[in-house]
């Protein structure tokens, strides 16, 4: 399998070349053609050497009857045949423009701009057009699409097709009882012989794709940054030391819903010891923890952008469960607000606001759970958390982008 494995590593490197050439139409076309031809050669090499591969017929037949028949894999195969025997793909460059007013108010439009235009020039053109409200945020994402696969952005399609082959070779290695290979890596740090057991795209591909997006404040055109980063899960020794220092209970098991009570116990201990707790998002595929992200935001605008980006990560990793831990302000609705069935003054701006710690989770099959505890500050700065309780305040605003993304994924067969 060494030849096919090395060719898959070539695909990984070529994907990053494709991303780097995103704003160069000719360079992008050349990089895409190279990627698709290399992608096709992976299975060709497996077939050529099948006599030497343990249980080949079993695992390759399973691939042929499942992953190979998906929309994106059919596109990759047909596209390779087309560029070799017919012509280049029918590529179109567009921009996906999203305006966000609040959690509930959002609109999207696809617009065509010359590939040479940068984000600031595109923003100026949008602001000069009629119909854009004078508030909120605008997100601009450059998109290359092929007319034969209009529901997919090209980079995302290439990443998804790469991961199908990653999984295929991983199964082949398992059949041969081979834990790994010592193939030499590339200059690009992330390109090595590892075959990750991921339910979605590689982290490096997700990060690279996010660099093709810019966010702007509508009133003044200033650039906004939503800040989130992967939080590496520590090794067993380091984790055990941290748990002992904080006198933490055992890390819970299960899916996103199952872990809410256990992670609330841990969050309460940390809150009482440190006097503060950051916002963390946990992504799951069933009972498997895919990633932990630390999230930071300095305003409601950047908070909305951060959860929009989290929704993109949900799709990239094919997550079906999300759990969020964080501090929050709570306030009681006034009689007028109850009568109008609205919130006129955000909890953070109320004089009677109450500090709380929340752990909430939702899953793709529409289950949800939330636990809440109130935080009290002592005269000497000490922090005390009340006993936590199960609450049901309905859908959380921050989960609106996640639910929307799952509906989009369902419509695309993902």
Image: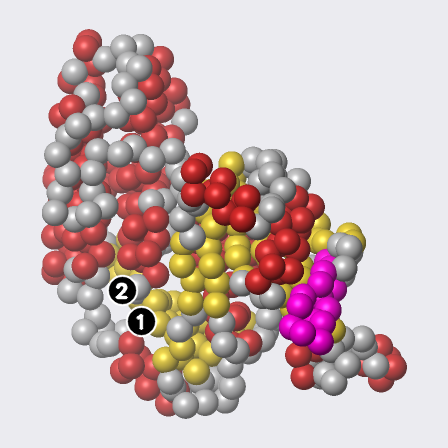
Q: Is residue 384 magenta?
A: yes
In magenta, the rendered stretch is 372-385
How many discs appear?
Answer: 2
Q: Is residue 32 magenta?
A: no
Q: Which residue is mark 2?
A: 93
Give the camera-side residue of 245 and 376: 245
| Residue depicted at 71% across the width and 63% down the height | 384
Q: Is residue 115 above or below residue 223?
A: above
Give the camera-side residue of 227 and 114: 227
| Residue depicted at 36% across the width and 80% down the height | 223
| Residue depicted at 15% across the width and 64% down the height | 24
Q: Is residue 383 left or right of residue 185?
A: right
Dot 2 or dot 1: first in sequence order is 2
Give the camera-side residue of 86 and 409: 409
Q: Is residue 378 left or right of residue 185?
A: right
Q: Are marks 2 and 1 in contact (CB under 8 Å)?
A: yes
| Residue depicted at 29% across the width and 33% down the height | 195
């Amino acid at each position: 399998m060494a030849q096919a494995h090395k060719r898959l590593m070539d695909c990984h490197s070529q994907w990053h070349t494709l991303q780097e050439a995103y704003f160069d139409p000719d360079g992008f076309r050349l990089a895409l053609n190279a990627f698709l031809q290399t992608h096709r050669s992976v299975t060709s090499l497996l077939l050529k050497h099948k006599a030497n591969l343990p249980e080949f017929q079993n695992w390759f037949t399973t691939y042929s009857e499942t992953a190979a028949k998906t929309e994106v894999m059919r596109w990759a195969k047909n596209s390779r045949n087309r560029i070799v025997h017919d012509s280049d793909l029918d590529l179109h460059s567009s921009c996906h423009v999203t305006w966000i007013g609040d959690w509930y108010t959002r609109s999207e439009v696809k617009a065509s701009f010359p590939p040479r235009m940068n984000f600031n020039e595109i923003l100026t053109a949008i602001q000069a057009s009629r119909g854009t409200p004078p508030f909120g945020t605008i997100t601009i994402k450059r998109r290359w699409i092929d007319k034969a696969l209009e529901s997919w952005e090209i980079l995302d399609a290439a990443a998804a097709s790469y991961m199908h082959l990653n999984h295929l070779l991983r199964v082949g290695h398992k059949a041969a009882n081979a834990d790994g290979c010592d193939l030499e890596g590339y200059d690009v740090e992330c390109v090595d012989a590892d075959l990750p057991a991921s339910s979605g795209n590689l982290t490096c591909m997700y990060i690279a794709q996010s660099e093709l997006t810019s966010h702007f404040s509508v009133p003044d055109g200033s650039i906004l940054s939503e800040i989130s980063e992967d939080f590496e899960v520590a090794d067993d020794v380091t984790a055990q030391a941290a748990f002992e220092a904080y006198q933490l209970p055992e890390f819970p098991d299960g899916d996103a819903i199952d872990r809410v009570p256990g992670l609330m116990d841990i969050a309460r201990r940390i809150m009482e010891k440190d006097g503060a707790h950051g916002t963390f998002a946990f992504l799951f595929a069933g009972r498997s923890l895919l990633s932990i992200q630390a999230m930071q935001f300095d305003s409601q605008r950047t908070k909305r952008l951060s959860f929009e980006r989290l929704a993109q990560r949900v799709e990239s990793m094919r997550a079906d469960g999300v759990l969020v831990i964080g501090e929050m302000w709570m306030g009681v609705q006034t009689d007028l607000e109850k009568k109008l069935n609205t919130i006129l003054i955000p909890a953070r701006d109320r004089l009677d606001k109450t500090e709380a710690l929340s752990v909430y989770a939702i899953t793709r099959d529409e289950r949800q759970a939330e636990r809440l505890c109130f935080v009290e500050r002592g005269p000497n700065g000490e922090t005390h958390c009340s006993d936590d309780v199960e609450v049901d305040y309905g859908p959380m605003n921050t989960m609106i982008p996640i639910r929307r993304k799952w509906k989009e994924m369902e419509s695309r067969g993902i």
